[in-house]
C-alpha cells in the first residue's frame, strides 16, 4: 500500500511540476523578447479605417453608463466610428443604457442600442447577432467593467496598416480597484502575470496567442474567416482565437496600451469568473486539442505550450488530489524519497512569473507583492469550484450557461434601485468547509505522529479553504443586511 501511495503521489507531483517547467520556459522567453518595443506606426488620420466599438452587456446597471460614456469619449474620426451597445439585459440596465444612448445620439454620436428578444448563445450569440449591423472594417470589444482610455483606438488601429494577415490586437488589462481590498489586490497580481508575462510570450513567440474577451480589436475579415462567434463553449474568446490562429491569422499584443477594468470585489463573483474560465478552457481543449496537435503551421514547442496553457486550470484538480493523499500517507507513516525535493524546486517556476510581472510593471512592486500570500490562499480556496467546473465541461452534450461576473460592487451604491446584484452560490461552500475539517484532522494526526512533512501543505489548505469560505459567508451576510 505504501508503494502505491508513493507512486500516486509521484504522478501528481510530476504533473504539477510540468506546469512549473512551463513557468521557467515562459520566463526565459520573456527575457528573450523583452527588448522588442512597440512604436505606433505613422498613419494619415484621413485614411483611418471604419471601426465599430461593441459593448456587450447583460444586467450591468451599476456600470453600463460609465462604459457608454467612456466609449463615446474615444478619440477617433466621428465619421468612421460606430458604437453598438449590445444589451441582452432583463432588468433596469436596458433603461439606463437607452437613456445614455439617446443622450449621445442627440449630440450627433453614431451609437445604437442593440437589443434581442432572447439570450440564445449568451455573449457569443449577442456579438454574432450585432455583427449584421456593424459597419466597421475592425471591431473593438469592451466588456461592461472597462473604461478604455481616449486614445485607445489611435494607439492600436494603425498597427493593422500594411499587414493584411494581422487579425487581432490585444491590449493589457489595467485595474480600477486593485487597492480596494486584499482580494482585489491578489487578483491584480494574477492578471498582471498573465498579461505582462504570458501574453507577451504567446504573441511574440507565436505560441497560439489569444484574445481575452475584452480590450481588443478584431479585423472583421478574420472573424468571418474563422467561422464567427460560436456558443458551444463558455470561453467564446479563446474559441474564436484558436480557430483564427489555426487558420493562419497573426495576432499582436500591445502591453504598452492599458485598458483599466474593475476587478470582482466579491468572492462569489470571483469564483464564478474563475469557474467559467476553467470550464471554457477545458471545453476548448476538448474541441481543438486534436487540431492543435496536428497543426503543421506551428512548432512543436508552440503546440505543447498551447495545450498546457489550455489545461492549466487542471492544477486545481491536482492540488486536491495531493491533499487527498496526505491523510492515508500519514496513517501509514509513508516516508517520501529525498529526490522529491527536485519537484518542489521545479514548482517555483510559476511563482517567479508573478514576481517578475510585478517588478516589470510597478515601481512599488515589492509592496504589491505583500498580497502574494493572499493570492496563494485564494487559489487554493477556489480549487473545489474550479475543479467542479472542469468536470462539468466533460459533458459535451449538456448546454453550459454563461454565468456572468457582474461588476459594480466597488461603486458607490446610494439607492434601493442600485443595490449590488445577488449571485447564486455554486454549492461548493460545503465542500470548502469539509476540506477545512479534513486539513484539521490531517494536521492533528501529523503532529501526534511527529510527521512534519505534510504540515505545510495541510496548513496552506486549511488557510485557503477557510479564508474563501469566510469571504463567501461574509458576502452573503453583507448583501442580506442591505436587502
Image: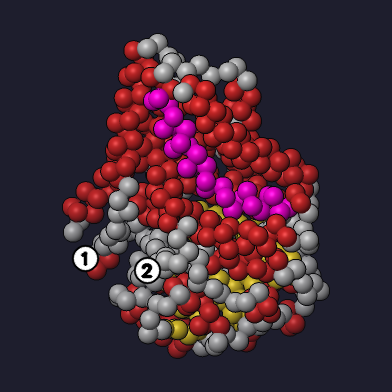
- Numbered range of the magenta stretch: 302-328
Query: Pointer 1: what residue?
Result: 416
Asked where in the image residue 457 lies, by quadrant, the reply is top left
Query: Pointer 2: what residue?
Result: 60
Say which label, 2 or 1, has the lower sequence index: 2
Q: In the image, what residue occupies the spot 51% across and 88% down? A: 108
Q: In the image, what residue occupies the spot 47% across and 32% down? A: 322
Residue 254: x, y in percent? Answer: 68, 59
Q: Is the magenta stretch mostly helix, strand or loop?
A: helix
Q: What secondary structure is marked by label 2?
A: loop
Total numbered circles: 2
Say whether residue 73 is visible.
no
Residue 221: x, y in percent? Answer: 69, 79
Disc nearest the viewer among 2 and 1: 2
Q: Is residue 206 above or below residue 418?
A: above
Callout 2: 10 Å neighbours few (<14), some, many (20+)? many
Q: In this view, does 115 lie above or below 368?
A: below
Q: Is residue 445 above or below residue 188?
A: above
Q: In the image, what residue occupies the spot 62% across and 77% down? A: 227
Q: In the image, what residue occupies the spot 61% across and 40% down? A: 19
Amino acid at each position: 500500500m505504501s508503494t502505491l501511495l508513493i507512486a500516486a503521489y509521484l504522478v501528481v507531483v510530476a504533473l504539477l511540476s510540468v506546469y512549473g517547467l512551463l513557468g521557467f520556459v515562459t520566463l526565459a522567453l520573456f527575457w528573450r523578447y523583452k527588448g522588442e518595443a512597440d512604436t505606433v506606426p505613422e498613419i494619415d488620420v484621413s485614411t483611418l479605417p471604419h471601426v465599430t466599438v461593441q459593448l456587450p452587456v447583460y444586467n450591468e446597471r451599476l456600470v453600463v453608463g460609465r462604459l457608454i460614456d467612456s466609449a463615446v469619449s474615444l478619440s477617433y474620426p466621428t465619421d468612421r466610428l460606430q458604437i453598438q451597445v449590445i444589451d441582452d439585459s432583463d432588468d433596469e440596465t436596458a433603461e439606463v443604457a437607452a437613456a445614455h444612448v439617446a443622450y449621445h445620439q442627440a449630440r450627433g454620436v453614431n451609437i445604437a442600442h442593440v437589443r434581442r428578444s432572447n439570450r440564445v448563445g449568451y455573449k457569443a450569440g449577442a456579438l454574432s447577432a450585432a455583427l449584421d449591423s456593424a459597419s466597421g472594417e475592425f471591431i473593438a470589444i469592451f466588456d461592461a467593467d472597462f473604461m478604455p482610455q481616449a486614445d485607445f483606438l489611435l494607439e492600436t488601429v494603425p498597427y493593422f496598416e500594411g499587414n493584411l494577415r494581422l487579425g487581432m490586437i490585444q491590449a493589457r488589462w489595467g485595474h480600477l480597484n486593485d487597492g480596494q481590498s486584499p482580494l482585489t489586490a491578489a487578483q491584480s497580481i494574477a492578471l498582471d502575470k498573465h498579461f505582462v508575462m504570458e501574453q507577451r510570450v504567446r504573441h511574440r513567440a507565436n505560441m497560439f496567442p489569444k484574445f481575452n474577451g475584452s480590450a481588443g480589436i478584431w479585423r472583421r475579415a478574420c472573424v468571418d474567416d474563422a467561422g464567427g462567434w460560436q456558443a458551444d463553449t463558455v470561453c467564446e474568446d479563446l474559441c474564436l482565437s484558436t480557430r483564427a490562429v489555426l487558420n493562419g491569422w497573426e495576432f499582436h499584443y500591445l502591453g504598452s496600451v492599458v485598458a483599466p477594468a474593475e476587478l470582482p470585489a466579491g468572492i462569489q463573483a470571483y469564483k464564478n469568473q474563475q469557474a467559467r474560465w476553467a470550464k471554457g478552457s477545458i471545453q476548448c481543449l476538448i474541441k481543438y486539442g486534436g487540431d492543435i496537435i496536428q497543426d503543421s503551421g506551428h512548432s512543436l514547442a508552440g503546440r505543447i505550450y498551447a495545450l498546457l496553457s489550455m489545461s492549466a486550470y487542471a492544477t486545481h484538480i491536482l492540488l486536491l488530489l495531493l491533499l487527498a493523499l496526505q491523510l492515508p500517507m500519514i496513517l501509514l507513516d509513508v516516508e517520501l524519497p529525498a529526490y522529491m525535493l527536485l519537484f518542489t524546486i521545479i514548482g517555483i517556476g510559476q511563482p517567479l512569473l508573478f514576481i517578475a510581472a510585478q517588478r516589470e510593471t510597478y515601481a512599488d512592486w515589492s509592496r504589491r507583492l505583500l498580497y502574494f500570500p493572499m493570492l496563494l490562499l485564494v487559489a487554493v480556496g477556489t480549487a473545489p469550484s474550479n475543479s467542479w467546473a472542469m468536470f462539468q465541461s466533460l459533458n459535451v452534450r449538456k448546454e453550459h450557461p454563461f454565468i456572468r461576473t457582474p461588476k459594480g460592487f466597488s461603486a458607490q451604491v446610494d439607492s434601493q434601485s442600485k443595490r449590488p446584484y445577488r449571485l447564486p452560490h455554486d454549492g461548493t461552500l460545503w465542500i470548502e468547509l469539509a476540506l477545512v475539517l479534513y486539513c484539521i484532522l490531517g494536521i492533528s494526526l501529523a503532529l501526534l505522529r511527529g510527521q512534519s512533512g505534510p504540515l505545510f501543505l495541510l496548513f496552506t489548505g486549511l488557510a485557503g479553504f477557510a479564508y474563501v469560505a469566510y469571504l463567501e459567508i461574509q458576502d452573503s451576510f453583507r448583501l442580506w443586511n442591505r436587502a
